[in-house]
Image: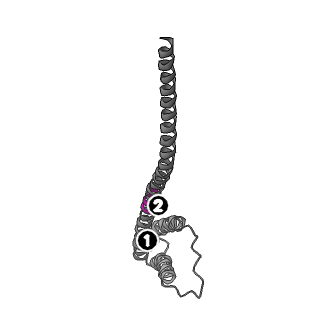
Amino acid sequence: MDDEIRKHLRSIRILVTLALLAAFLSFAFTYLLFKEVSTPLEAIRSQQIAKVESKIEALIASRAESMKKRAMIELELAVHDLEQIASQSTGEIASRAAKALEEIRSLLELLKGQPEPPPAAGETAPQAEQESHGEKASEEAPAATQPEEAPTPAQ
């Protein structure tokens, strides 16, 4: 009877050892397989995240650029309108329009990011000519209307 118990115990030990060995091998293969699969998955996920982040940054930059362009267009329209007002009006209105025109031009320069050089005497750029004609007209308009004002009582 002791021999039979020893045989059973020995067979149980062998079975337990084989079970532990099988569990260890299963764990080792699973770990290696998971490690090989998880590394590319992490790389793919990080690439996807990078793509999404770049798209978001591009959209933000695009929106900011379009808002800047829209503001520049609106300011250029305001400059044009103020040049017309300054050339067609006299006195205080012309001076207020000229002052507003200078402020809007400085805002426009800030938006462009580079200061606009003052027009030179021999410059032939159409925009500089329009601006200089608009400024000359606004300067000439008050001078032309001053002699035509109502006569003073001393005269």
Q: What residue is drawn where x is 46% and y is 52%?
A: 49
Inspect the magenta stretch and tell me whether residue 8 lies in it: no
The image quarter in which residue 121 lies? bottom right
Q: Which residue is mark 1?
A: 76
Residue 113's x, y, as percent?
A: 56, 67
Q: Please tell me whether mark 2 sits on a helix, a strand or a loop.
A: helix
Q: Which mark is residue 61?
A: 2
Boundaries of the magenta span: 56-63
Label placed on residue 147: none
* 109, 101: nearer the viewer: 109
Can you give x and y, in whole percent of width and height, for residue 9 in the image? 50, 18
Task: Give the residue at x 46% y 54%.
Answer: 44
Label 1 residue SS: helix
| N-terminal-most mark, 1 or 2 | 2
Q: Main secondary structure of the magenta part?
A: helix
Residue at 49% x, 42% y: name it: 29
Query: Residue 33 at what x, y percent from top left?
Result: 48, 46
10 Å crowding of disc 1: few (<14), some (14-19), many (20+): some
Above or below, comparing residue 33 to residue 134 in the picture: above
Which amino acid type is marked by label 2? Ala
Residue 140, image x, y percentages = 49, 79
Q: CA distance from mark 1 to mark 2?
A: 22 Å
Amino acid type, callout 1: Glu
Q: Nearer the viewer, residue 68 or 3?
A: 3
Q: Dot 2 surroundings within 10 Å: few (below 14), some, or many (20 or more)?
A: few
Could you tell me if residue 150 is visible in this image? Answer: no
